[in-house]
Image (cartoon, coloured by chain):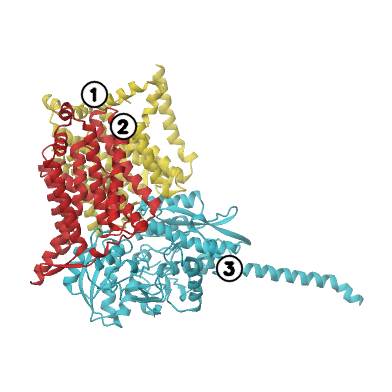
Chain colours: A red, B yellow, C cyan
Amino acid sequence: MNAIAVMLITQAVHGLAYGMLLFLVASGFTLIFGMMGILNIAHASFFMLAAYVAFQIMAWSGNFWLALLLAPLAIAFLGILMERVMLRRIRRFKLGKALVLFELMLTVGIMVCIEEAVKNIWGTDPQIINAPDALRGLIPCFGMTYPAYRLFIIGLACSILILLSIVLFKTRLGNIVRAAVQDAEMTVALGINVPLVFTFVFGLGTWLAGVAGVAAGPLLTVFPGLANQMLLDSFIVVALGGFGSLMGAFIISMFLGELTAFGVQFFPGYSTIILFGFMAFVLTFRPLGLFGERE
Amino acid sequence: MKRQFGKWCAWAMILGGLYMAPRVLGVFELNVLLGTAIFALFSLSLNLLLSFTGLLSFGHAMFFAAGAYGTVLVLTRLSGFPLLPLIGIGAAAAIGLALLLSPLLVRVSGHAFAMLTMAFSQIMYATVMKLSHITGGNDGISGFAIPSVSIPVVGVVDMALEQNFYYFAISILGLSAWVMWFFTRTPFGSIMVGIRDNPERVTYLGFSVPLSKAIILCVSAGFAGVAGSIYALFQNMVSVDGVLGPLSSFSPLINCFIGGLGTFIGPIFGTGIGTILLELMSAHPEQAQLVFSLVLIAIVLFLPGGVIMLYWKANTRWMAVRQNIQNRFFKRRIYE
Amino acid sequence: MKSIRAIAPPVTCICLLCLYIISMDIGAARAFTPLQADFSSYDPEKQEIPSGDTIKVGLLEPFSGQSASAGEISNWLLGWVVHDINSQGGIMVDGKMKKIQVIKADTATQPVVAKRALQRLILNDKVDFFVGTAGSHIAIIGNQMAEKYQKIFLNYSAYSVHLMNAQNFNRYTFRTCSTTDINARGLAYYFSKTPIRKFYILCQDYSYGQDFGASMKKALKEFVPTAEVVGEVYHPLWLKDFAPYLSKVQASGAEMIISSDWPPDSWNLMLAIDQMGMTIPVAGQFFDDPRMGENLKNKKVGLGNTVVNFHLCNVETERNSRFNKIFHERYKDNAKVQIDWPTGVVGGVIGHFYWFFDVVQRAGTLNTEKIINLWEGDTYESFAGKLTMRKCDHQAVMDMFVSTLVSPSKWSKTGNGLGYQEQAVRIPADIVMSPCPEGLK
């Protein structure tokens, strides 16, 4: 294989790995938005918090798999707590259209709060999570070698994607969730406990962010600014992919990952401008996003 | 009659207070006051979009930045440019940007509008960073001299002196705020509220919603530009983080919210409270943001009408207040 | 006998007077000596705040926002020196022993916040001088405010060359750290003695990174004419994924990456090199973090990393070994501060603070003009070598030090892991210093 092909394939896999990570975060973001109309600014903060919780669990037990199991659950618990205690409270104010703003401000407050709390607990120095030894080497594939951990991330995200699709499209629970996304009031009329479904989706979304946070840990050092970049990227994914569209989130995540990787290779420094330019273009002519069906 | 009198008294006190401020306060406190006033105007201009027209913007800072950079670039490149037109240039730069973007922005509303404004402000951020030979990039432009103003009778007024600049800036800010308030009272103000509550009806009444939105956007951008322009002169610098940073579009939103959505003067209160909080926490900068976020969360949860609601709460029952918020935001016009 | 009795009182008086004068003189000249205090009790978070008539020093640093750790580190270093001086009774100024009081001011690494914080420091807290700061865009504000309010500003951590050029220089600002230019020249000179010739410049995309990239290209041209810069790319701050950049580096055939990155970017770069199965060494100022080595799986990663700094702990001077010993004694088993040797910036900045307070002590006054006059052209024997304050642009002139990382190294955390080579290479000041900028007032 010649050098250029190797380079192209390597960059493509890099893009895929980051895209998958982004998808894990953005899928929760878009699910929560699609279902409850909440633009959860704190979503990426849960991602960052998960990385820290994983770091702490690693420090206590030294077991990465335990961290991967427990940290997302802890984050999901926090998310459910936030939904039941705070978001539900302001829903009771019956604010109509203005509710969106109240939820937005609440999540902005929570985002800042999480970031500052993390700084107070763990300090601002970067922390390192080590991947288990089995995942730290290089794996030869297709005539070249590739870091095992990145392949693990791709595999993890793929299996979660498949699991998620099965749950959402093949089970009764999935039917209810999709119905509630389509029309919450109608679903209530069918006698379904929609607030409970809301809680479930919120927990699921934050759990996904938590998984992404733990998975990102060994790839990057863990530091409080981790959330900012992820927030901006997941904003783009959700806006471009269409609010509430899982499929859109997946495609745009991949696209964004590849654009970043190839942008570095071919036009370094301009990928931000290109990306936001593209976003502006799409939103102008398709305000619902590329794959969105409704506001 | 009695209420009218009270109102006049309040105005006299506010004006007197602002006039006396340089004599009572030290330079530092005066600067804090002026800084708050500038951000209050910026928040007011955003409020025009948010509370009156119902447009959520995540990128209002770009107009603020356009004003700041416009003023500073003209000031540093063309020597001998007088002060007042400089602020006009700031406003013009912001309005120009709004005109340029309005064909795209007026097509959308709701979250798409928020996302689109965010995209444009990010593009502007990246562009300002890339054009560092013009804009100074990360370092920004700083240390320029502020031109003096010569007034026929009084003589030359040195604007490098804090007090003089304070009087100059506060009068422009006050005037801008008043013009904005007046704007909301004109028939056009009703169109704005109409667009917020029921755009179809506005169309049936024979007004063009996109055109009206464009006008509102330009007006709002213009005042944000004025705020940005004065801000750059006041700080004697413009830097990309200061005017376009990650939180610079969110902090006026937060100010509007803390003050009280749906009112005209809410943002002024919100900005003031934000400043006071940060000043109180100045000895513990590490905890300042944490406290601020907790206050924000507490206001959302327990005081959903913003600080201004404390006033309502004093004389109305809670249920009526809740009705009020709804009314203020959806059905009625302005409710100062 | 009688005569003796007659002259006895005046003689006694004179003798006593002499003794008194001598003792006073000793008191006045009693310089504090660095590293006298008991540091085992020193904790930057529980610093004793002296009250009463004190020397007030403003510490202008980010204590919130993304770079808050830089502020914490500075607070720790300044606190070390202040703890030392205060436990010796303080500094004699204007005929009075005064203790030093540090007042923190948060910049949040934003110029506007920094300006307001500085106004508070100067106008409200009435500091005697202020020190700082991370970020050259913040240091510029420091320069301007120092000039406006005529307060001395000690810049110990903003490296951009242009801070002290004709446009930004003023006589109230002093810089004790090196510059991007000096660092680049030090590195390039070192490379001229090594066989490495293919370099890849990978820096952060903002003024400090761009300055360093430009300086590096210039310096390589001057010292290593045969060197080849095979690629140059600037990445955003706090980059999320280094892999695409490293693939590009890999394809270019570079032998060494030159980077201005600081944590967390520098750490992420090293982690990414490890994960990608590469072993390419990195040169820069911040690629020597002792905490990094244990977390790299491939033990060959990091070998050959080259660091340049104005201080390194492996500089063998008598003063430095004493300092190393005291510092190591305090921090070797400290879980919180994981730096157990006073590596580059840590030791260097402590030395600079000692220099500054030594100048104040010798000036014997808080008068700005007198301190400036004394400091200009002043020479001080610091831990690693001589520091001289150049009069023309207030830039400290000093030898630079370069080290490569080896394993096992006695300077590593475990004593046999990745760390500095045995002894740093000293590059004399006259090689690394660039001439005074033109057009200074």
Specify the quadrant of the image occupied by residue A148. bottom left
Q: Residue B331 carries which label?
A: 1
Tell me the kind of residue under disc 3. Phe
Front tag of 1 and 2: 2
Asked if badge 1 and badge 2 are on a common chain, one would say no
Specify the quadrant of the image occupied by residue B96. top left
Q: Residue B183: x percent and y percent? A: 25, 30
Q: Name the residue under label 2.
A: A89
Q: Mark 3 points at which residue?
A: C32
In this view, the residue in front, C317 or A17, is A17
Front tag of 2 and 3: 2
Provide the chain ID for the residue under circle 1. B
Specify the quadrant of the image occupied by residue C418. bottom left
Secondary structure beneath label 1: helix
Residue sitting at x 29%, y 81%: C192
Q: Residue A141: x percent and y percent? A: 13, 66
Residue sitting at x 60%, y 52%: C52
Report if residue A291 is visible in the image.
yes
Secondary structure beneath label 2: helix
Tell me the kind of residue under disc 1. Lys
In this view, the residue in front, C157 or B326, is B326
Provide the chain ID for the residue under circle 3. C
Q: Residue B298: x percent and y percent? A: 37, 36
Q: Residue C437: x percent and y percent? A: 36, 70
